[in-house]
Image: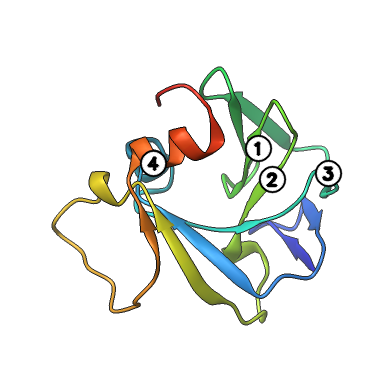
Amino acid sequence: MKGSCLCGAIEVVAGEHSEIGLCHCSMCRRWSGGPLFAVHCDDKVQVSGDTLKAYRSSEWAERAFCSECGTHLYYRLVPDGEYYVSAGLFQGHEFKLASQIFIDEKPPFYALANDTPTMTGKQVFEQFAVGDN
């Protein structure tokens, strides 16, 4: 899959995926203005462009964006290098919403009709053995 930021300065190339996950955590909502729809990729994602900026948002993760247009690009786990790439980068690609995490942090002002598996923040941290957000 190939995608780009809004201004086209950053290109992201990842393996083919058909499912996305949704994160309702407070950091993702603060970062994006809503839940983060992301494609869980491996550590082989290729990101190119001169306007890439990364922010270390916790001990275990960083978030990246285009410094020109502000497009949110990815959330990356530092220990294993796995990427969670913003699904919106891949225009024209069809995805299925497969899961939702941090469901316990979802605010009451929105609801999704999709019936997906869900995990609380505590369950996520237990599964992936990372510190609290």
- Give the CA separation, mark 2 to mark 3: 17 Å
| Residue at the disc numbered 4 | 123
Q: Residue flagged by tag 1: what amino acid is it?
A: Arg
Q: Is residue 35 left or right of residue 93?
A: left
| Residue at the disc numbered 1 | 76
Q: Check whether the beta carbons of the residues at disc 4 and disc 1 lie within 8 A of each other.
A: no
| Residue at the disc numbered 2 | 83
Q: Residue flagged by tag 3: what amino acid is it?
A: Gly
- Give the CA separation, mark 2 to mark 4: 20 Å
Measured as percent of width and height from the top left, residue 55 is found at 59, 25
Measured as percent of width and height from the top left, residue 68 is found at 65, 42
Q: Residue flagged by tag 4: what amino acid is it?
A: Gln
Q: In the structure shown, which secondary structural element does the residue marked by tag 4 occupy?
A: helix
- Give the CA separation, mark 3 to mark 1: 17 Å
Q: In the structure shown, which secondary structural element does the residue marked by tag 1 occupy?
A: strand
Give the quadrant of the C terminus: top left
- Give the CA separation, mark 4 to mark 1: 19 Å
Q: Residue flagged by tag 2: what amino acid is it?
A: Tyr
